[in-house]
Image (tube, rainbow, N blue to C red):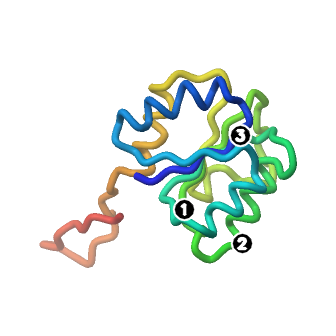
Amino acid sequence: MKIIIADDDENLISMIVPHLKFLGHEVVCVPNGAELLKKVKEIRVELIISDINMPDIDGKETFKKLRAMVEYVDVPVILISGLEIKEGEELEVASQKMKFIKKPFGLAVLEAAIKEFSAPKIMDDFDGPGDIPQIKE
């Protein structure tokens, strides 16, 4: 899976990038939301991981701008932060192919979130008896 990570925390980047590459992912890193928005115009990614608290454009604003881009309306986003996202915040986490992970987190937590977005899902709407379930990508 081609992943872009936007985070200004070099320690976090140095921890997760080698692990994601070991798992077979292609990873590109940028230091902030402004750079992420530039980079996704140059390359097509399948997953975006972004810190919320960054210089220039923060993760929340970056998320809103990504969703305004036709090619990134459905691309999954994982937002990470040391702060909590409160219920009812404008990001509406559950409804927009987005997941929130609170720092600090273990690599297994990040890996599980990525798998959640990359695993094919069985459609649950069948036309009738004998219908064969289809795989959604």
Relative horizontal placement of residue 131, taking residue 52 as reference (left or right): left
Q: Which residue is mark 3?
A: 51
Disc 2 to disc 1: CB gap under 8 Å: no
Counting from the top left corner in percent of width and height, residue 24 is at: 34, 42
Quadrant assignment, res 55:
top right
In the rendered structure, find residue 68 and report the number of the disc placed on it: 2
CA–CA distance in space, label 3 to label 2: 19 Å
Q: Which residue is mark 1?
A: 75
Mark 3: few, some, or many residues within 10 Å (few <14, many ≥20)?
Answer: many
Relative horizontal placement of residue 130, taking residue 15 as reference (left or right): left
Q: Amino acid at mark 2?
A: Ala
Of the two numbered discs 2 and 1 on the same chain, state the one appearing first in sequence. 2
Disc 3 to disc 1: CB gap under 8 Å: no
Mark 2: few, some, or many residues within 10 Å (few <14, many ≥20)?
Answer: few
Quadrant assignment, res 128:
bottom left
Quadrant assignment, res 35:
bottom right
Question: Quick check: 111 above or below 1?
Answer: above
Question: Quick check: 10 above or below 125?
Answer: above
**Residue at left 44%, top 30%?**
19
Q: Nearer the viewer, residue 25 or 49?
A: 25
Q: Secondary structure at mark 3?
A: strand
**Residue at left 33%, top 63%?**
124
**Residue at left 41%, top 37%?**
21
Q: Secondary structure at mark 1?
A: loop
Of the two numbered discs 3 and 1 on the same chain, state the one appearing first in sequence. 3
Counting from the top left corner in percent of width and height, residue 132 is at: 17, 70
In the rendered structure, find residue 25 and report the number of the disc placed on it: none
